[in-house]
């Protein structure tokens, strides 16, 4: 694990971040998103796409998109070398705060049933199970747990 020196910076993702975002994505997921998938989200006013930067290096990214007053955490990934230091929690909190400020009142997400670490993060942040999507994931095939959180604007 890489120890964090200094304060992590959470900021909007930029085109020049995509190569590093893809590296983190591939390290974290068996079916990673593609460059065009991320590229298509840059600059959209319906998408919050943020990165966590430590000492000038992107070490995490997150995507939350919204439609009217509903949002979805579509992607959240932390470089394996930087896990366990609260970066995923901080990034998720940041995304949820931005969504609430934009008028989002509830947020959904899907998580692998077997991903106990992520499920615990979401539980601590107030997400509650609302359903199952059978056979949602590939490589390996697995059900997704659907979670929801109600947001309250500050």
Image (cartoon, rainbow, N blue to C red):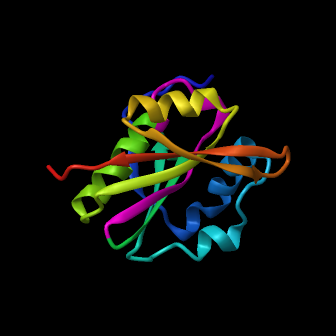
Q: What's the residue at 43%, 47% (across, down)?
A: 148
In this rendering, is residue 9 above or below 35?
above
Instruction: Work out whether residue 107 or residue 129 is closer to the camera in this orientation and state it.
Output: 129
Residue 28: quadrant of the picture = top right
Q: Position of residue 140 (x, y in %)?
A: 85, 43
Report if residue 67 is visible in the image. Answer: yes
Instruction: Give the quadrant of the N terminus.
Output: top right
Q: Is residue 117 shown in magenta? A: no
Residue drawn 48% across the image and 27% down it: 4
Quarter of image, res 48: bottom left
* Residue sitting nearer the eye, 121 or 24: 121
* Residue interval drawn in magenta: 69-88
> In this view, which residue lies farthest toward the left?
154
Is residue 59 visible in the rendered image? The answer is no
Query: Would you place residue 52 above or below residue 65 in this image?
Result: above
Report whether 1 appears left or right of 92.
right
Q: Position of residue 122 (x, y in %)?
A: 47, 36
- Queried whether the magenta region covers residue 80, the answer comes back as yes
Query: Residue 119 vs residue 52: left or right?
Result: right
Q: Nearer the viewer, residue 24 or 28?
A: 28
């Amino acid at each position: 694990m890489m120890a964090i020196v200094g304060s992590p910076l959470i900021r909007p993702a930029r085109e020049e971040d995509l190569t590093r975002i893809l590296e983190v994505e591939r390290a974290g997921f068996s079916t990673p998103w593609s460059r065009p998938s991320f590229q298509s989200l840059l600059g959209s006013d319906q998408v919050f796409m943020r990165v966590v930067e430590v000492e000038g290096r992107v070490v995490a990214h997150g995507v939350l998109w919204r439609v009217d007053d509903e949002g979805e955490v579509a992607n959240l990934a932390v470089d394996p070398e930087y896990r366990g230091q609260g970066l995923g929690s901080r990034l998720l909190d940041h995304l949820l705060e931005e969504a609430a400020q934009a008028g989002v009142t509830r947020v959904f997400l899907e998580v692998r049933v077997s991903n106990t670490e992520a499920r615990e993060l979401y539980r601590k942040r107030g997400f509650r199970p609302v359903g199952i999507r059978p056979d949602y994931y590939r490589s390996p095939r697995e059900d997704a747990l659907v979670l929801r959180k109600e947001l309250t604007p500050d």
